[in-house]
Amino acid sequence: MSKIENGKMVLIKEKVHIPTQVENIRQISEDMFKRKNQKFNVCINVVHNDILTDSLRINRVIINLLNNASKFTPNGGKVELRIIEIPAENNKYANIRIIVSDNGVGITKDKLPEVFKPFYTDNIITNSKNDGVGLGLTIAKSVVESSGGMIKIDSKPMEGTKITIDMHFQVDASASEYKKKEKDIGIMNNKDYNLSNMTILLAEDNYVNQMVEKALIERYGAKVVIADNGYMAYDMFVHSEESAYDMILMDIQMPIMNGYEATKAIRDSKHINAKTIPIIAMSANVFPEDVEEAMDSGMNRYIEKPINIQKLMETIGEYLIK
């Protein structure tokens, strides 16, 4: 969040296949909508399937918007994600419109200018017994505008909300060559990182991060069990059977008990695997003193957020793949 406030967010450009990315988002979000019996529709209508963009941040923007849409839509409601290409004068670029819409509680017109402020709430949301929008819209606005795009919101109380994002992407000219490489890499990863029959305890308090990290890891065959805070992770571990968990992925900033405290408590417990289970720290704070504190608390390794899946799999592989 500090990078957003200071205007120092740097976006990278990498090759992205739009249908694949959207399908990943659909899979990540599926359980969230099922829990509320909500109908989730996805529509893609683009000419250029392959673009250059910061896939991790764009994905996080869309997932955050879908999370808010589900949160403020009642059970049995409807949420839709549409990806549409708007014609561009230069065929080397693609104008992509991303629309997330719902038929939820909506927001009054006079409150719309406020929704991009951190942790916004209004009376409608409060009366519906929901939290505010958190940082999701704030981060979305920052990422979109850092990319030269625009984001707007339309909403009516008790009718629903539509968020529209317009972004301008460079087309990936080497798409066919990239697809072949991507296929080869995928085969290599599936072979090298087979986590079948392994169970990982994920300690993470942010719901969107939970969905993203769980989906990424489970692609490689592992089972991921989620703890919503440090104390829950500690409690789940100390009351588990000897072979219940193969590894713990530990966020640092969590309520009730942070990652450092939870790790110390686990290491000091009487569980048979207390001293040996690998515990991997995950945090956006990567200053030397943060890494040192993680090691002092009993963690084995330290991974920077946002999570790089290749780096994460390499780290998991060091401990779990023999």
Image (cartoon, grey):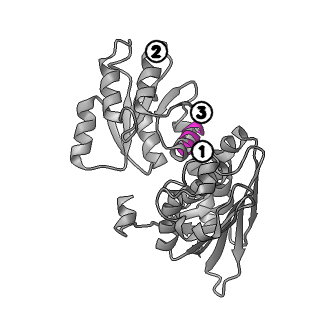
| Residue 187: numbered disc | 1
Q: Quadrant of residue 220?
A: top right
Q: Which residue is mark 2?
A: 239
For label 1, the SS is helix
Q: Quadrant of the N terminus?
A: bottom left
**Residue 163 pos. (x, y %):** 65, 66
Q: Amino acid at mark 1?
A: Ile
| Nearest to viewer (mark 3 / mark 1) | 3
Within-10-Å neighbours for mark 2: few <14, some 14–19, many 20+: few
Within-10-Å neighbours for mark 1: few <14, some 14–19, many 20+: few
Does the CB distance between marks 1 and 2 fall below 8 Å? no
Relative to 220, is 162 on the left or the right?
right
**Residue 278 pos. (x, y %):** 38, 27
| Residue 221: numbered disc | 3
**Residue 260 pos. (x, y %):** 31, 33
| Residue at left offset 47%, top offset 47% | 310
| Residue at left offset 49%, top offset 62% | 138
Q: Is residue 174 visible?
A: no
Q: 189 or 78, which lies in front?
A: 78
Q: Which residues are magenta?
A: 211-219
